[in-house]
């Protein structure tokens, strides 16, 4: 009985790993939008909106067949010429961050358009 339980626990632990999505790392949002999401099960970590560590990046998942309107912060369409219909969708919980939409928040850049 314990052996059967052990086998079930091992299977339970392996099945989610088999279903994991491939993950890529990209430097910025422009690269994300220009990339070809040729795999419907693609997860991407973007380092920043304009550059690494500017707090505008984050995790995204390609959702094949999705036609949600893009908003340049949480939903992006691919501009790649052979990309299938779908959207890059930001994975998050909690509050939105203005830097996700391209705001710089540096005190000298006019971020009005990004905040509207």
Image: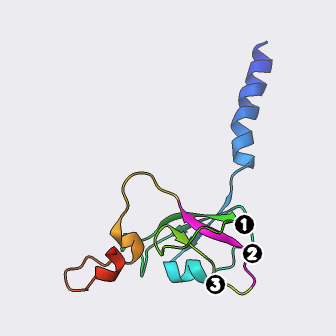
Label 2 vs 3, first from the N-terminus: 3
Looking at the picture, how far across and down is residue 83, in whole percent?
A: 72, 79
- Assess whether residue 66 is covered by the magenta stretch: no
Looking at the picture, how far across and down is residue 79, in whole percent?
A: 63, 84
Q: Which mark is residue 79?
A: 3
Label 1 vs 2, first from the N-terminus: 1
Q: Which contiguous range is marked in magenta?
A: 82-90
Crowding at mark 2 (Cα within 10 Å: few <14, some 14-19, many 20+): some
Looking at the picture, how far across and down is residue 1, in whole percent?
A: 79, 12
Q: Residue at x 19, y 80 (%)?
A: 107
Marks 1, 3: nearer the viewer: 1
Instruction: Write down the quadrant of residue 45 in the picture.
Output: bottom right
Foreground residue among 26 and 40: 40
- Are discs 1 and 2 less than 8 Å apart at CB? yes
Q: Which residue is mark 1?
A: 65
Foreground residue among 111 and 18: 111
């Amino acid at each position: 009985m314990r052996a059967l339980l052990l086998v079930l626990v091992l299977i339970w632990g392996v099945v989610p790993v088999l279903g994991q999505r491939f993950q890529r790392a990209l430097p910025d949002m422009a690269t994300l939008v220009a990339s070809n999401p040729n795999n419907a099960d693609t997860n991407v970590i973007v380092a920043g909106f304009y550059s690494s560590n500017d707090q505008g990046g984050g995790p995204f998942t390609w959702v094949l067949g999705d036609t949600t309107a893009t908003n340049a912060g949480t939903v992006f369409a691919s501009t790649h010429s052979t990309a299938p219909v779908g959207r890059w969708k930001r994975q998050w919980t909690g509050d939105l961050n203005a830097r996700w939409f391209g705001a710089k928040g540096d005190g000298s850049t006019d971020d009005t358009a990004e905040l509207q």
